[in-house]
Image: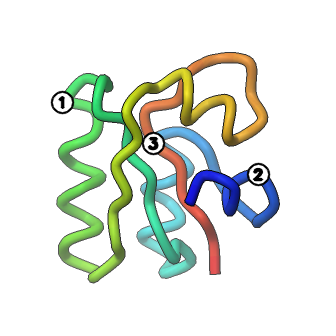
Amino acid sequence: MLSELKAGHKVVGVKQTRRALGDGKAARVFVAEDADPRVVEPVEAMCAERGVPVVRVARMKELGAACGIAVGSAVAALLN
């Protein structure tokens, strides 16, 4: 699953993911399990409202690396 993030069109971070969800552009959202629940729960709620599947990733660092950034990421979205 994470290999899709490396190759596909994506957005990284809460703000950009929420924008992609609002615009109907997010195909799948990746959420790090070790992220602060206050940060990721609103994104997960938006996914549930819009029927976008959520994929859990063990660590923020792992998600950040899959997105090609040097720091951890709480959320990322694969775009349509």
Q: Is residue 28 left or right of residue 67?
A: left
Amino acid type, label 3? Val
The answer to which of 2 and 12 lies nearer the viewer is 2
**Contact? badges 2 and 3 (CB < 8 Å):** no
Q: State which quadrant residue 44 falls in.
A: bottom left
Q: Is residue 35 left or right of residue 8?
A: left
The residue that mark 1 highlights is 38
Q: Nearer the viewer, mark 2 or mark 3?
A: 2
Q: State which quadrant residue 38 falls in.
A: top left
Please state the horizontal and vertical placement of residue 55, each as a whole percent of the image: 37, 58
Within 10 Å of disc 1 (Cα), the crowding (few <14, some 14-19, many 20+) is: few
Please state the horizontal and vertical placement of residue 48, each as a whole percent of the image: 20, 71
Please state the horizontal and vertical placement of residue 65, each as a whole percent of the image: 68, 30
The residue that mark 2 highlights is 6
Amino acid type, label 2? Lys
The answer to which of 37 and 54 lies nearer the viewer is 54
Real-space Cα separation, disc 1 to disc 3, in angstroms? 12 Å
Q: Is residue 33 left or right of residue 30?
A: left
